[in-house]
Amino acid sequence: MNTRIIAIVNQKGGVGKTTSAVNLSAGLAMMGHKTLLIDIDHQSNTSSSLGVRPLTQENTVCQLFTAPAETFNISTIILETMVDNLFLIPSHRNLSSVELDLPYKTNIDNRIMLRDRISIISNNYEFIIIDCPPSLNLLAINCLTCAKEILIPIKSEDKFSLDGIVQLHSVISSIKQNLNPDIEIMGYLPTFYTASTNLAREILDQLKKQFDKQVFETVIGKRIHIAEAPIAHQPVQLYAKGSYGAKAYNELAKEVINRGKEKIIS
Ligand SMILES: Nc1ncnc2c1ncn2[C@@H]1O[C@H](COP(=O)(O)OP(=O)(O)OP(=O)(O)O)[C@@H](O)[C@H]1O
Ligand SMILES: [Mg+2]
């Protein structure tokens, strides 16, 4: 299977990475595509958004980075979710200490652990979506080394939202050169968009000027149902079926699917 591995990345905090990871994954799964969502953030917001809060770090993503090769069994960390076709590797708050120890693991290449360890199951899924931490730390490098495509959410209500993109691009190009030649930016996703504000319109214009067709046609507006869904531990498509947020994330899922088809044709 030609699995599409998509990392949702932006080192800026609070731009809608987790919200987009959860609701995009749910949209893809509800459209019949078997999807694995991996939570690589010690805040575990993705896991919590789907009602999972593991008490111990066993059976979580921590195992990917800590378990010895002889005992590591990936099937023990993949959970079913309330959405058919959607599976989750949950995170745990201890992932932050795992990240601190990672540079000292000198017997392995600690930048490619995620890629290595999910390689045996990646063909079981049509999509693997990775929710990255708000940083460009070693865990984020693992995400970028594992992914084939990158989706970058851009917060439309923050005038500094484009400032970090240069740094992100330079990390991506270094990873492309050294570790992952196949990686590509699939698209920039405007989030928290309020059409009535000049700032949001200006940021969207700037994005389109700079990145043209790489900007998704789908724009995610700022809406209360989208903010409430994780508190109810559900994707927005279940929490508020038929709402603006549910429709917007389903539109994004369709666009993501179509971008994959365009690549095959071109
Ligand atoms: N379109 C939206 N409308 C309203 N609220 C939103 C929207 N998108 C995200 N939020 C809310 O904004 C907050 C930040 O979003 P989210 O957690 O997805 O960002 P993040 O980039 O993953 O943050 P972090 O960098 O801390 O991981 C959350 O409380 C979320 O519910
Ligand atoms: Mg997050």
Image (cartoon, grey):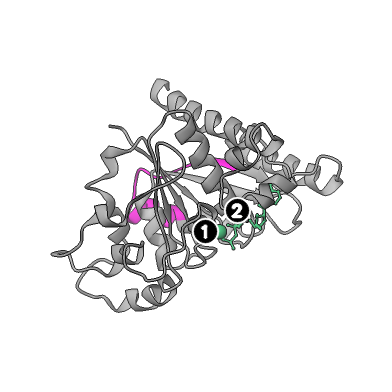
Asked whether 181 falls inside the magenta stretch, the response is: yes
**Residue toward you, 134 or 166:** 134
**Residue toward you, 73 or 81:** 81
The amino acid marked with disc number 1 is: Ser
Tell me where residue 218 appears, x and y as whole percent. 64, 34
Left or right, residue 30 beside residue 156:
left
Mark 2 neighbour density, 10 Å: few (under 14) some (14–19) many (20 or more): many
Q: Examine the rendering and report whether any part of residue 112 can be seen.
A: no
Q: Is 153 located above or below residue 65 in the figure?
A: above
Q: How many labels does the image show?
A: 2
Res 265 quadrant in image: top left
Tag 1 or tag 2, which sits nearer the N-term? 1
Identified at 67% across, 46% down, the residue is: 226
Asked whether 88 falls inside the magenta stretch, the response is: no
Identified at 75% across, 40% down, the residue is: 205
Report whether the residue tagged 2 is closer than 8 Å to ligand 1. yes
**Residue toward you, 201 or 237:** 237
In the rendered image, the residue lying farthest to the top is 265
Mark 1 neighbour density, 10 Å: few (under 14) some (14–19) many (20 or more): some
Res 241 quadrant in image: top right
* Residue span colored magenta: 172-188
Q: Which mark is residue 230?
A: 2
| Secondary structure at numbered mark 1 | helix
The amino acid marked with disc number 2 is: Pro
User: What whole-number distance in Å separates the C-alpha atoms at marks 2 and 1?
Assistant: 7 Å
Q: Which mark is residue 48?
A: 1
Left or right, residue 22 beside residue 226:
left
Tell me where residue 133 appears, x and y as whole percent. 50, 62
Tell me where residue 101 appears, x and y as whole percent. 34, 78
Q: Are marks 2 and 1 in contact (CB under 8 Å)?
A: yes
